[in-house]
Image (cartoon, rainbow, N blue to C red):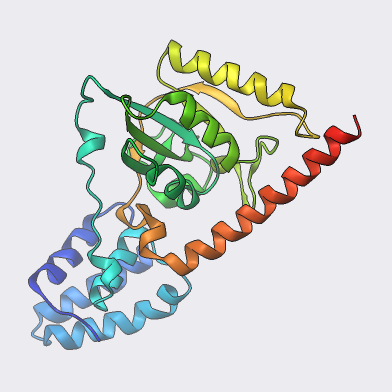
Amino acid sequence: MVYVSESTLRDIYNLLLDPGTRDWERQQLRTAKDLIEQGTPPATALERLEAVLRPLAVRNNLTPAVTDFYLRLTDDPAGAMAFDLTAHEAADLPYQDRAIFGGGCFWCMVQPFETLSGIISVVSGYTGGHVPHPTYDQVLTQATGHVEAVEVIFDTRQMTYQQLVDLYWQLTDPTDANGQFEDRGNEYRPVIFVRNAAQQMIAEQSKQAVKASGKYRRPIVTTIEPAGTFWPAENFHQQFYKKQPQRYKAIERARREYLQYQKIQGWLHERTR
């Protein structure tokens, strides 16, 4: 069922101007806009638009902003979930700090951090590259230099940077420089982005400890790099585990099973050294 409101029509105009909208999507949106302006009942024009977008929507092949629009158009509750970026945009309070990690698809990197005590906000985004305001499609080309990452804003009175780094190693495969798990490509490489000397020292010491543990048969390739501008990803990507719980569980389960396999391999490696 198509849901029509003033905001729906406003969304169409905004998406027409959004640089992240693909040409084909823009063409369909423009057709719907023109039909409405020519006197076609909005519900009729939007039902046509929904039908045209549906094949790509069911295969998750729409761009993030158009996906959000489609969910609202079909009155899906996930479409109404707008992520609050206030904490990301505001200056840190004296007892706040930020940690930035790249560890494969950011969909699976949010929930493990967000459910900890002392976490203020976890934002999915892009960083490490040279293109300002990157879109998801741009990052996927691997031409921006950006990786998918999460920015964890935390309360230093309840959580330490060391604890976050320790968790990071448990969530990633530090031996894979060309992606993580089923996500392949430079935009998924594992990186710890450090904001200052204190974070760099903790990250470096932690990496050395992982190397010395003997748990991995291959070299540790996770890099430690200076943090640059962190660009929040599109709304669709924020808190994905809440918006698409079934899809998230399937991805997270496959990731967890691989890490368990790797843990067993590491145990066998230690026993045979």
| Rendered location of residue 28, percent (x, y) | 30, 73
Residue 224 as seen in the image, left or right of residue 175: left
The quarter of the rendered structure image containing the N terminus is bottom left
Front-most of 86 and 18?
A: 86
Q: Can residue 33 be seen from the camera position used here?
A: yes
Residue placed furthest toward the right: 272
Percent x, y of residue 6: 8, 71
| Occupied quadrant, residue 77 | bottom left
- In the rendered image, residue 155, in percent from the top left (x then y), is placed at 30, 29
Residue 93 sits in quarter: top left
Q: In this rendering, is residue 169 above or below 259? A: above
Q: Residue furthest top?
A: 197
**Residue located 78% across and 39% down the image:** 266
Instruction: Report if residue 189 is visible in the image.
Output: no
Please give the name of the residue rendered at 20% of the width and 26% of the height, measured from the top-left corner: 91
Q: Is residue 125 above or below residue 205?
A: below
Q: Is residue 52 above or below residue 201?
A: below
Q: Is residue 243 left or right of residue 166?
A: left
Q: What is the total number of numbered labels drawn onto the structure image?
A: 0
Image quarter (top left, top right, bottom left or bottom right) of the C terminus: top right
Residue drawn at 31 percent across, 59 percent down? 65
Q: Position of residue 271 (x, y in %)?
A: 87, 35
**Left/right of residue 52 with respect to residue 199 in the rendered view:** left
The correct choice, above or below, for 53 with respect to 43 in the image is above
